[in-house]
Amino acid sequence: MLHHPSLHPLSWCFRIGVALVSMTFLAACGDLETVTPTEETPVAEAVSPTPADASTEPEIEIETPVESAEIVVPPAPIPAAGASEPVTLKLAFWNIQWFPGTKPEPTPEEETAQIAMVQKEIAEMAPDVIGMCEIRDAVSANIAVAKLPNVTVDVVSRFRGREEDVGFQQLVVASKIPAMSAWNEEWKSGTSLPPRGFAFTAYQINERHVLLFYSLHFKSNWGEDSENFPMREESSRQLLAHADAMRTAYASLGEVTVVLAGDFNTSLDDERFSEEKTLRMLLDAGYTWAWEGVPLRERHTLPAGGMFASVCFDHMFVMGPARIVSAVMP
């Protein structure tokens, strides 16, 4: 089990945020036609891919979490001519507090200290795919994974902050696997207008399996619950719709597994959030919670301090042929 040293807390709150998931895919034989979503795909207009470093720029606000799990995807039916050994992938998510530097205006020394810690921890985790949030920009994203061999930063968001400029807390996905598609989108205005959006990547794991990975950072708890709950719930509604569309769009490539990984800023345990539906919407839609069965004391991704006692705000949800084997907070 990895040990993550404490990050330097903000004055109001301290959060550690890493999720580590291992998934096993059957290495399959046979030829499957490789088809990526096109203009003919019903959902293409809404989700047409953009270059990995490009994005739309919504008007949203900005705002921080460590967790870990193991997943196994059982073999999918394949032609009898060629079953082969499973492929195991390690997936991770980390809310790296205001990287680099742990706060909006860090000193060079604070940047150097956090960079050294983050690079060491990511290298020790050795994920095949990692989602991150609260990353300053694309340069910072590449610095964070610099000690991880053979990794590529697939997508970096450019969401705007409160002052209409590009904010300092962006979403990232990096991986050792070539991405078929990688882009980010802001949430649309629905019952409310949530801040930020999502970063999305699609990977052809082998001829029979596709992995769709979302890096997420839902609305913070600053402000009133009466405003925050609906914004997070609206994010879940849009996330579910997008993930359903993507499962359909990529289904021609094989069995599709969807992973929703992020800082959801809400909990299934804390009484304060008992009336909120954000996470329960994902469960009701058929997603499996990576923390299921793990005692709360082993998944406090937000240590006590500031606004909360110790809580679990950071989660992974999985749909598809994946089977969760274990979940731990490094």
Image (cartoon, rainbow, N blue to C red):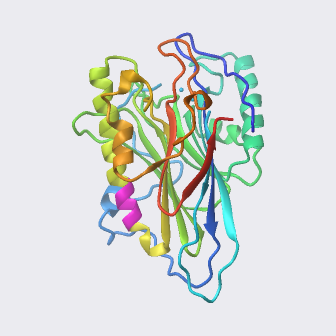
Is residue 176 shown left or right of residue 236?
right
Is the residue 328 above or below the residue 85 in the image?
A: above
| Quarter residue 265 falls in | top left
Q: Residue furthest left?
A: 191
Is residue 58 shown left or right of residue 70?
left
For the point 51% across and 77% down, the residue is 34
For the point 44% across and 75% down, the residue is 252
98 falls in the magenta region: no
Q: Nearer the viewer, residue 119 or 323?
A: 323
Q: Nearer the viewer, residue 81 or 43?
A: 81
Q: Nearer the viewer, residue 240 or 37?
A: 240
For the point 40% across and 26% down, the residue is 61
- Tally of numbered discs: 0
**Which residues are the magenta region?**
243-248
Q: Quadrant of the C terminus?
A: top right
Q: Quadrant of the N terminus?
A: top right
Is residue 177 shown left or right of residue 186?
right
Query: Where does the image place residue 195, in percent across and percent down from the top left?
Result: 37, 32
Q: Nearer the viewer, residue 141 or 251?
A: 251
Examine the rendering and report whether any part of residue 146 can be seen: no
Is the residue 225 above or below the residue 260 in the image?
A: above
Give the prevailing secondary structure in the magenta stretch: helix
Query: Where does the image place residue 129, in percent across and percent down from the top left?
Result: 63, 51
Query: Where does the image place residue 329, in percent across and percent down from the top left?
Result: 64, 35
For the point 53% across and 78% down, the residue is 77
Examine the rendering and report whether any part of residue 59 can be seen: yes
Query: Where does the image place residue 290, in percent across and percent down from the top left?
Result: 53, 45
